[in-house]
Amino acid sequence: MGEIFNSILKPIEILVAWIMYGWHQLFTMIGMPAASGWTWALSIIGLVLVMRAAMIPLFVKQIKASRKMQLIQPELQKIQKKYKGKTDPDSRQAMTQETMELYRKEGTNPFSSCLPILVQSPFFFGLFRVLNGLEKIATGANEPIGPITKAVASQAESATIFGAQLSDHFLGANSLNTKVVTIVLIVLMSATTFTTQRQLMMKNMPASALDNPFAKQQKILLYAMPLLFAVSGVNFPIGVLIYWFTTNVWSMVQQFYVIRRMPAPGSEAEKALHERLARRGKPIPGSVPSAAAIGADGTDGSDGTDAVAPKPGGGQRQQPKGKKRAKNQGPPKAGRPEDRDVTGDAGSEPTP
C-alpha cells in the first residue's frame, strides 16, 4: 500500500517542486534574495495561486452543490419520513432510488461539494513531502525532487521567516520563534476557516434551509474544524501551514465574491443583492418592470426586449379602408347623436 501511495504522489511532488521553483526563480529575477525565507514563502503562496486558479470551476460547482444540498433538505426529509421504520430491502431500495432521483432532478449530489478538497489534497500532501524531505535532500540522503537539487534544498532548508525555518514543526522545535509562528498560523487558519463556513451558512442560505439535520451537521463542523486545525497543525511544517492559510484566504475571498454575485434564493445575500440593485436603479432579476420603468418606445431597458405598450381607444381594432374612400369621406359632419360615430374610432363609418 505504501508503494502505491508513493507512486501516486511522486508525479505530484515533482509538479509541486517545479511550480515552487518557478516562482522562486521569478522572485529572484526581480531582486529578492534567493536564500531568503520570504522568497520561499512567496513561492509557496504562488503555488496556491496556481492551484486555486486552476480549480475555480470546481469551486463554483462546490458552492452551487452545497447550496442545492441545503435547499433540498425539506424534500429529503419527506423521503426519509415516508420510509421511516421500514427496514425491508425493497423499501430501502425504493428510498435510495427516490433520493438519487431527487439528486438527479436538482443536478447535485453530496460528493460535488467535496470535489475541491479531494482535488487539492494530493497537492497538499505533495508539498508536505517536499518540505519534509528538504533536510535529507540537502544532506544527500534522498534523491532530488525535480529541480529541488541538493544545493537548492540546502538553501530552502536554511531559509527562515521571523526566525523560523519553513521546514520546522511545532513538535520537537527548540526555537521559540518556531512555536510562536506555528501558533499564529494555526490561529489564522482557524479564523479564516470559521469565517468561510459561517458566511456560507448565514448569508447564502434561507432560514428554512438552516433548520434541518444537514445544516446542524454544518454548524457542528463550523466549531469542530478550528479544534481539528489546532490538533493537526502542530504536526505540519511551517511551509505547509503557510500553504493552508493562503488557500483558506483564497477560499474566503472567492466564496464572498460568488455569494455576492450569485446568492441562493431567499437568502440574506439575495436580499442584499436586490437592495443594491434597487439603489442603483437596476432591474431585479425575476421581477416585473413597473410602468415608470417602461420607456416611450415600449422597452424597459433591462434586457433589450420590447414591452407591450397599451393601445389607445380601449384596444379596439381599427377598420382598414382604401385610399379613395378615405379621401372622399372627409371630416365627420355635425348632426344628430345617432348619426355620429359611437365607436370613438377616427376612421369608422357613421352609423346609418
Image: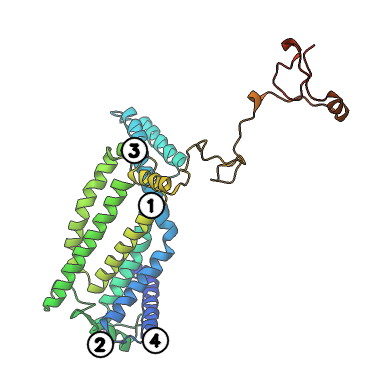
Packing grade of label 4 (10 A; few <14, some 14-19, many >=20) is: few
As measured in the structure, the alpha-carbon distance from the residue carrying label 4 to the one carrying label 3 is 53 Å
The earlier-in-sequence mark between 3 and 2 is 3
The tag earlier along the polypeptide, 4 or 1, is 4
Alpha-carbon neighbours of circle 2 within 10 Å: few (<14), some, or many (≥20)? few
Q: Tag on residue 139?
A: 2
Q: Where is residue 183 in the image (x, y as percent from the top left)?
A: 16, 68
Q: Of helix, strand and loop, which one carries label 3?
A: helix
Residue 219 in the image: x percent, y percent? Answer: 23, 46
Asked if the residue under mark 2 is in contact with the one under mark 4, i.e. CB atoms within 8 Å, the reply is no
Classify 10 Å Cα crowding around label 1: few (below 14), some (14-19), many (20 and above): some
In the image, 58: left or right of 6? right
| Type of amino acid at the residue the image marks with label 2 | Thr
Looking at the image, how many numbered discs can be counted on the residues? 4
Disc 4 vs disc 1: which is toward the camera? 1
User: Toward the viewer: 137 or 171?
Assistant: 171
Q: What residue type is labelled 3?
A: Gln
Q: Which residue lies furthest to the right in this view?
A: 324
75 in relation to 150, above or below: above
The quarter of the picture where residue 209 lies is top left
Picture residue at 30% right of the left edge, 38% below the top: 207
Q: Distance between the residues labelled 4 and 2?
A: 27 Å
Residue 128 horizontal side relative to residue 115, left or right: left
User: Answer yes or no: do the residues labelled 4 and 1 have beta carbons within 8 Å?
Assistant: no
In which quarter of the view is residue 163 placed? Answer: bottom left
Badge 1 element: helix
Asked whether residue 292 is in view, the answer is yes
Disc 1 designates what residue?
260
Q: What number is the disc on residue 29? A: 4
Q: Decide which of tag 1 and tag 2 comes sooner along the chain.
A: 2
In this rendering, the answer to whether 87 lies above or below 227 is: above
Residue depth check, mark 1 versus mark 2: number of the one nearer the observer: 1
